[in-house]
Image: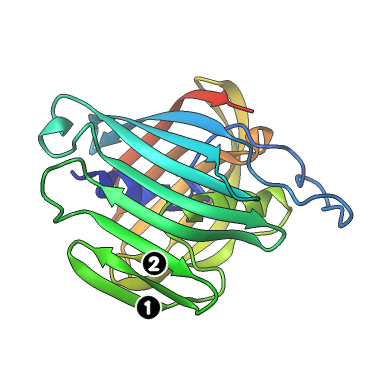
């Protein structure tokens, strides 16, 4: 199982699979005179399993970048002994993005699977002035027109969380995945109190689906922590394949 497969389920972490203690502003009606809610820097670690077998840990880190309103969001893997056969501990996925009153907008995305070959690596640049996203993914040249709200595989996690923090539903979000744009719809399906490493926490449950796909991702998102997903599951053809559970959370102001 490659890092890419482990990360498939984090696409709601709107993601993150995404994350950490976020500001609680926006849980009630948004004050138009106030700065719009946005994530605070964090480090969040999840234990991951695939079909019941421990796959190791994934760590999501959000930190400020040089430009105003810019952040770097990245994921690293600490694979289990068995998972090391297919996932490198040097693997990293990173998104540089901008967050403002309009929401989250990716600027640059990269994936390095940590292996000597670049067969599974990727890099994308989002040119919002010319409305084109281009780069190379798995040795294939990519050039596609942007769409309003278009996200990469990591920025979509922050996009969903940011929407919920601002009191709006994520709805359907376009995502560039490899050489095409897919559309994921996020729907609230319930509420639950779950026991976690952070204690007993009230969560809202969201499902992420895509037309024509048999995969369904469920996320237990905690309003107390700015809609950070505390648990995530991905089902394929009705069977749970991947599970992620929060293990540690550190806010880094």
Badge 1 vs badge 2, beta-carbon distance below 8 Å: yes
Q: Is residue 54 left or right of residue 185?
A: left
Q: Which mark is residue 144?
A: 1
- The residue lying toward the viewer, choosing from 45 and 40, is 40
Q: Residues within 10 Å of mark 1 (few under 14, many from 20)?
A: some
Q: Which residue is pictured at 43% across the width and 28% down the height? A: 45
Q: Position of residue 241 (x, y in %)?
A: 27, 44
Q: Is label 2 in a helix, a strand or a loop? A: strand
**What residue is rendered at 33% in x and 77% in y?**
143
Q: What is the x, y in percent for residue 73?
A: 47, 44
Q: Quadrant of the C terminus?
A: top right
Give the mark, 1 or 2, whose residue is nearer the N terminus.
1
Which residue is at 50% across, 20% downward? 197
Q: Which residue is mark 2?
A: 176
Where on the picture, by quarter, is residue 125? bottom left
Tell me: 245 left or right of 123.
Answer: right
Residue 104: give x, y in percent of width and height. 59, 58
x, y percent for residue 28: 81, 47
Q: Is residue 246 above or below residue 219?
A: above
187 to 183, vertically: above or below:
above
Q: Nearer the viewer, residue 74 or 228?
A: 74
Q: Quadrant of the N terminus?
A: top left
Tell me if residue 140 comes above or below residue 169 in the rendering. Answer: below
């Amino acid at each position: 199982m490659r890092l890419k497969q482990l990360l498939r389920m984090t696409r709601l972490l709107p993601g993150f699979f995404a994350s950490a203690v976020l500001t609680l502003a926006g849980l009630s009606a948004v004050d138009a005179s106030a700065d719009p809610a946005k994530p605070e820097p964090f480090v969040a670690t999840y234990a991951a399993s695939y079909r019941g077998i421990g796959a190791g840990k994934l760590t999501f880190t959000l930190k400020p970048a040089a430009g105003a309103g810019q952040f770097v969001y990245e994921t690293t893997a600490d694979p289990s002994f068995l998972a090391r056969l297919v996932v490198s501990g040097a693997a990293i996925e990173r998104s540089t993005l901008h967050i403002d009153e309009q929401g989250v907008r990716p600027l640059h995305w990269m994936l390095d699977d940590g292996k000597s070959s670049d067969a599974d690596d990727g890099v994308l640049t989002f040119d919002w002035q010319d409305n084109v996203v281009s780069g190379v993914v798995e040795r294939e040249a990519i050039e596609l027109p942007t769409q309003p709200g278009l996200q990469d595989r990591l920025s979509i996690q922050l996009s969903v969380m940011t929407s919920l923090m601002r009191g709006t539903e994520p709805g359907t979000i376009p995502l560039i995945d490899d050489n095409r744009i897919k559309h994921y719809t996020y729907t609230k399906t319930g509420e639950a109190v779950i026991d976690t490493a952070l204690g007993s926490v009230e969560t809202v449950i969201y499902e992420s689906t895509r037309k024509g796909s048999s995969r369904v991702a469920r996320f237990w998102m905690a309003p107390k922590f700015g809609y950070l997903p505390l648990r995530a599951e991905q089902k394929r053809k009705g069977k749970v394949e991947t599970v992620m559970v929060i293990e540690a959370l550190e806010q880094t102001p």
